[in-house]
């Protein structure tokens, strides 16, 4: 499920980039607007994906701080 969700949103982000490419209004700043929209979509997707995957597969397991281990706990 998790890999499927990341891939589906990648497809949505790609579609959003393609839409921003074709429907940008003509003018002097067309290239700037296209670049800004595509960069914003990419950055939002990457931020979401990294946060989602970091929560899905954490590097460290949670530990209880009130439990002592070793001879001092006796």
Image (cartoon, rainbow, N blue to C red):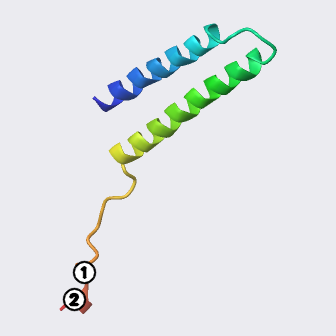
Disc number placed over residue 50 in the picture, else none: none
Q: Could you tell me residue 48's position as x and y percent? A: 46, 37
Give the residue displayed 45% in from the left and 18% down from the top.
11
Residue appearing at x 37%, y 51% in the figure: 58
Vertical side of 70 occupied by 52: above or below = above
The label shown at residue 69 is: 1
Q: Is residue 23 above or below residue 6?
A: above
Residue 56 screen position, x and y as percent: 34, 43
Where is residue 43, by image quadrant? top right
Task: Please report contact status of discs 2 and 1: CB closer than 8 Å, yes or no.
Answer: yes
Mark-to-mark CA distance, 2 and 1: 6 Å
Q: Position of residue 16 (x, y in %)?
A: 52, 17
Q: Residue furthest right?
A: 28
Quadrant of the image occupied by residue 31? top right
Where residue 7 sits in the image (x, y, percent)?
41, 23
- Name the side, left or right, on which 23 lies relative to 46: right
Secondary element under disc 1, as helix, strand or loop, is: loop
Using the rendered view, name the quadrant where residue 32 is placed. Answer: top right
Graded by Cα atoms within 10 Å as few (under 14), some (14 to 19) or many (20 or more), the crowding at tag 1 reads: few
In this figure, what is the number of numbered marks? 2
Q: Looking at the image, which residue is at 21% across and 89% down? A: 73
Q: Which residue is mark 2?
A: 73
Residue in front for this viewpoint, 50 or 40: 40
Foreground residue among 59 and 55: 55
User: Residue pushed farthest left?
Assistant: 74
Task: Determine the secondary structure under disc 2.
Answer: helix
The quadrant in which the N terminus is found is top left
Q: Quadrant of the C terminus?
A: bottom left
Q: Is residue 5 above or below residue 48?
A: above
Residue at 50% in and 22% down:
13
């Amino acid at each position: 499920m998790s890999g499927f969700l990341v891939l589906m949103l990648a497809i949505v982000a790609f579609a959003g980039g393609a839409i921003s490419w074709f429907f940008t209004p003509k003018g002097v700043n067309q290239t700037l607007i296209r670049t800004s929209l595509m960069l914003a979509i990419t950055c939002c997707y990457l931020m979401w994906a990294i946060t989602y995957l970091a929560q899905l597969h954490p590097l460290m397991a949670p530990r209880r701080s009130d439990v002592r281990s070793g001879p001092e706990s006796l």
